Image: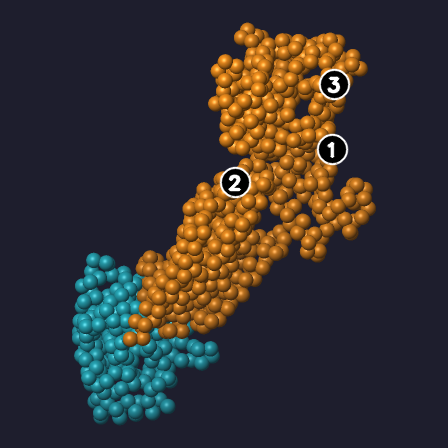
């Protein structure tokens, strides 16, 4: 019976010329909006490509399109929903349904289903428009699916609300205006906070708009739709049974009970939230590394943000953004509390905390504090990591022979890398072997970069002693004489063939001839889930002796089609050169008592130098190496995934055709269909 | 009479606000009968029929269709009911066939029997020629026929017709009256009118309402017995006034 009613409703919608004209207008607006967004994206994508974790085409085009359609639906649905019941009353066709042997709920559900089927067609058409993105880029299907689901739920909610308004009156115009006023009012509630905001369908749609499906959002929409359908059914039932005082009391009690039950159900759903991030790159989720850090933090965590009140629009925005960002962490750690302090209203507290700017924050956990001036996942998770660890890992860097410095700013220094390490909770200290009696015991990891002057035998002996005692070591080699470190290479069983690695693959990417690309990562904890290209300038090849007490694993392999050559020639010379592939980084392990000793050797010190560390995943690999050396292999660094749909390719030709079809052909066809109906009706 | 009861109204009362529009009206209808509901404009004829069709709730009293209480089991009682309101409930943008099929499906006619019933109803109402026409393009007389077809397509036991011949030309009126007579032979019909000779021609019994009260319930012969029908109708309504 519901399908019969729904089908008639759908037919009568399509029988009205006005419907087709409205669809033509909607199609034109959406088409225009879509093309404008595509055009915008095409213009800025070159700049976006420079950014770390730039937004993809789907989130830049499809998501705003869905948002625009959501707003259009808010305005359009009352125009369609008003006719459902009010117009039947005004046209005196209502007795046909009222005298038929059907229940009020069948009428309500049938009409709702009919309208929703019609709206689904509109949403499906918008979905098709989003799918045309595939012509130019591998768009994110999960994000599109979440958006369409959100639109559908939003449309169903507005339709249920409009249906209820239509049941209340016999004037379609009154029904349309009351539905519009109510849905617009609910839309505005999105600006509010907390519970007020949670009442707005738009607030829940926004989660789906970014690709996040939350159980509480789904429950909200289901309750919203059920509430207004139930109210409409109750109203029609009361109309058929006649109104008495007793029934009025009963129905107000019913309404109260219904609202209370729904409120209860919703808060239950909000208390035990479940989320599904449908986006391909998990845009709305923390990286596994952050999630792991949060899981390690036992007990409450407080984040105090010093941001001005909402009254100031620009600074109020800070609170909203911070709230959204921290909300992401709160999803993983519910006992994370966020406190806002207004620096203007509470200057003493602010000064006491040493806060200077708006938006600064203090993270507190287990009595320890961490001060943050910048807010992103990398900095916050790093701070949490330091708090979780409770102590800082000491990193000693051999110095005094013109080595690359971890706090230097010169091109050949490793300053950027050092900064990243500090963010990750490492303390860096130089170690002058000429002065220090030995490598200190509290050094978690020792770093050796290539010396420019020869080490004294006494210094080398201290290094060898350190390795012998089971110390963990990162050795960054360059294609230069070892200057006293030959003994160390021998102790590690390393064989260092002369010459540098030549990689034609790098030349194909217009990189200098003496660069090698790290593309192969044999399975190892350091490179788990790591698939970025790394760059090794002027690298030397690493080989090992066959018999050794060390377990040797290749970390990075390169120059698959390349070779080792004393001179960076363009061609492979079989008499002089040795063919690849080549190991660019090695991990060595051995058991010393209870402890597992870990050593990493990399064939290029320049790979982490300031001049090159920004290339590919160099810094990330460097941090991963140290985390593994420090026994923190689970805490690998956060690599913002690159959007696969970041490159949108549409030719002028394609755009012209799309414009003609979306802005001219489709609207004209729809107008013609409506005109045909209108003409047929007149004759 | 021995034929079974199809409709029974007991003490039907309806208030519009504080005004009593229908006051304690009781009557019955049996199979094979055509009952005429007579009265001046505003006597409460349409309100009474609306209550019998389950479109308007009664403020008091009960109505039973084929022994089923309309207020208690509306969906069951309404299945033996066909109703044509004063204004035919027509969707102007639908074709006649589609509309009648929809009405039939609303009354739970099985899809298998749909074509047969549709043909029968169209045949009886003289609509065989215009199944493909849009209802909005039909003349008033044909729209009225579609309205009647909608009320009889599921062959209900009780057919309620509210002023079925209003606005029709004499030839159409005659056809419709013949149709009503035929319907009355198969089931039972209750129709309202303010035309006395219509009652005389098609009805077996008449009920006269005046200002919401029932003032006469008897056969046409009873009504005729005193003198001619018109003067007895006027006498009865005047007495009441």
**Tags 1 and 2 in contact by the CB under 8 Å rule?**
no
Q: Residue at x 47, y 77 (%)?
A: B17
The chain whose colour is cyan is: B
Question: In the displayed structure, would residue B229 be above or below residue B162?
Answer: below
Q: Residue at x 71, y 39 (%)?
A: A372
Which residue in the protein does label 3 denote?
A401
- Do pointers 1 and 2 mark residues of a single chain? yes
* Nearer the camera: disc 1 or disc 2: 2
Name the foreground residue: B108 vs A289: A289
- Do pointers 1 and 3 mark residues of a single chain? yes
On the image, the x and y values in percent for residue A326 come to 63, 42
Name the foreground residue: A270 vs B232: A270
* Nearer the camera: disc 3 or disc 2: 3
Q: Which quadrant is the C terminus of chain A positioned in?
A: bottom left
Rendered image: mark on residue A368: 1
Q: Mark 2 packing: few (<14 Cα in 10 Å), some, or many (20+)?
A: many
Q: Which SS class for mark 3?
A: loop
Q: Chain of mark 3?
A: A
Instruction: Left or right? Give the position of B179 relative to A469.
Output: left
Q: Mark 1 packing: few (<14 Cα in 10 Å), some, or many (20+)?
A: few
Which residue in the protein does label 2 denote?
A643
């Amino acid at each position: 019976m519901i399908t019969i009613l729904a089908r008639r409703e759908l037919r009568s919608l399509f029988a009205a010329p006005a419907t087709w004209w409205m669809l033509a207008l909607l199609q034109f607006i959406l088409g225009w909006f879509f093309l404008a967004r595509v055009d915008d994206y095409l213009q800025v994508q070159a700049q976006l490509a420079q950014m770390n974790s730039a937004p993809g085409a789907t989130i830049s085009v499809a998501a705003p399109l869905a948002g625009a359609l959501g707003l259009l639906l808010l305005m359009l649905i009352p125009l369609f929903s008003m006719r459902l019941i009010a117009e039947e009353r005004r046209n005196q066709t209502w007795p046909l349904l009222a005298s038929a042997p059907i229940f009020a709920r069948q009428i309500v559900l049938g009409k709702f289903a009919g309208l929703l089927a019609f709206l689904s067609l509109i949403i499906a058409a918008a979905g098709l428009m989003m799918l045309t993105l595939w012509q130019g880029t591998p768009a994110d299907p999960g994000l599109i699916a979440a958006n369409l689901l959100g639109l559908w739920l939003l449309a169903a909610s507005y339709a249920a609300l409009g249906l209820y308004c239509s049941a209340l009156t016999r004037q379609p115009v009154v029904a349309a205006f009351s539905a519009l006023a109510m849905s617009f009012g609910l839309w505005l509630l999105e600006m509010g906070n907390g519970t007020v905001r949670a009442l707005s369908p738009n607030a829940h749609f926004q989660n789906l708009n970014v690709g996040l499906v939350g159980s509480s959002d789904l429950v909200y929409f289901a309750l919203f739709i059920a509430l207004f359908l139930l109210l409409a059914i109750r109203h029609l039932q009361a109309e058929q049974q006649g109104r008495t005082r007793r029934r009025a009391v009963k129905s107000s009690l019913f309404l109260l009970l219904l609202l209370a039950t729904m409120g209860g159900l919703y808060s239950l759903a909000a208390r035990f939230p479940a989320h599904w991030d449908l986006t391909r790159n998990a845009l709305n989720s923390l990286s596994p590394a952050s999630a792991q850090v949060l899981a390690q933090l036992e007990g409450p965590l407080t984040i105090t943000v010093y941001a001005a009140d909402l009254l100031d629009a620009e600074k109020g925005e800070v609170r909203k953004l911070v709230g959204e960002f921290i909300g992401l962490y709160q999803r993983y750690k519910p006992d994370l509390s966020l406190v806002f302090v207004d620096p203007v209203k509470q200057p003493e507290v602010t000064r006491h905390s040493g806060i200077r700017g708006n938006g600064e924050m203090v993270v507190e956990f287990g009595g320890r504090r961490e001060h943050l001036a910048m807010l992103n996942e990398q900095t916050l998770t790093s701070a949490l990591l330091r708090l979780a660890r409770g102590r800082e890992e000491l990193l000693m860097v051999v110095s005094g022979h013109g080595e690359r410095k971890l706090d230097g700013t010169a091109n050949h220094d490793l300053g950027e890398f050092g900064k990243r390490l500090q963010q990750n909770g490492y303390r860096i200290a130089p170690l002058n072997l000429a002065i220090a009696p030995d490598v200190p015991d509290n050094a978690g990891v020792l770093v050796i970069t290539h010396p420019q002057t020869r080490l004294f035998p006494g210094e080398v002996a201290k290094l060898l002693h350190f390795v012998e005692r089971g110390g963990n070591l990162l050795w960054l080699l360059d294609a230069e004489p070892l200057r006293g470190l030959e003994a160390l290479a021998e102790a590690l069983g390393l064989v260092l063939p002369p010459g540098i690695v030549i990689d034609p693959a790098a030349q194909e990417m217009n990189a200098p001839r003496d660069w090698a690309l790290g593309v192969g990562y044999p399975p190892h904890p350091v490179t788990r889930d790591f698939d970025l290209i790394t760059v090794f300038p002027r690298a030397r090849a690493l080989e090992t002796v066959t018999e050794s007490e060390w377990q040797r694993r290749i970390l990075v392999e390169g120059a698959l089609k390349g070779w080792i050559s004393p001179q960076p020639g363009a061609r492979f010379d079989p008499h002089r050169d040795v063919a690849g592939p080549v190991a660019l980084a090695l991990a060595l392990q051995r058991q010393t008592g209870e402890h597992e000793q870990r050593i990493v050797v990399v064939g290029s010190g320049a790979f982490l130098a300031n001049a090159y560390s920004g290339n590919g995943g160099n810094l990330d690999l460097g941090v991963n190496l140290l985390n593994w050396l420090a026994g923190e292999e689970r805490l690998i660094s956060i690599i913002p995934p690159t959007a696969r749909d970041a490159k949108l390719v549409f030719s002028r030709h394609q755009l012209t055709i799309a414009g003609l079809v979306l802005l001219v052909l489709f609207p004209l066809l729809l107008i013609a269909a409506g005109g045909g109906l209108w003409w047929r009706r007149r004759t | 009479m021995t034929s079974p009861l199809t409709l029974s109204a007991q003490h039907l009362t309806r208030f519009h606000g504080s005004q009593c529009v229908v006051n304690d009206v009781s009557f019955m209808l049996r199979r094979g009968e055509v009952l005429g509901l007579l009265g001046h404009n505003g006597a409460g004829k349409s309100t009474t029929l609306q209550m019998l069709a389950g479109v308007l709730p009664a403020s008091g009293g009960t109505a039973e269709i084929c022994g089923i209480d309309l207020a208690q089991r509306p969906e069951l009682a309404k299945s033996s009911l066909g109703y044509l309101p004063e204004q035919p409930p027509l969707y102007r943008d639908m074709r006649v066939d589609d509309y009648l099929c929809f009405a039939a499906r609303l009354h739970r006619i099985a899809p298998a029997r749909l074509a047969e019933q549709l043909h029968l109803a169209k045949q009886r109402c003289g609509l065989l020629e215009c199944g493909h026409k849009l209802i909005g393009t039909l003349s008033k007389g044909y729209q009225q026929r579609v309205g009647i077809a909608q009320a009889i397509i599921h062959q209900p036991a009780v057919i309620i017709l509210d002023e079925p011949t209003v606005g029709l030309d004499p030839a159409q009126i005659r056809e419709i009256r013949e149709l009503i007579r035929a319907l009355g032979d198969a089931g039972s019909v209750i129709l309202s009118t303010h035309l006395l000779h219509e009652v005389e021609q098609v009805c077996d019994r008449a009920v006269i309402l005046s200002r919401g009260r029932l003032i006469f319930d008897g056969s046409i012969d009873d009504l005729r017995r005193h003198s001619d029908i018109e003067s007895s109708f006027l006498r009865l309504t005047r007495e009441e006034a």
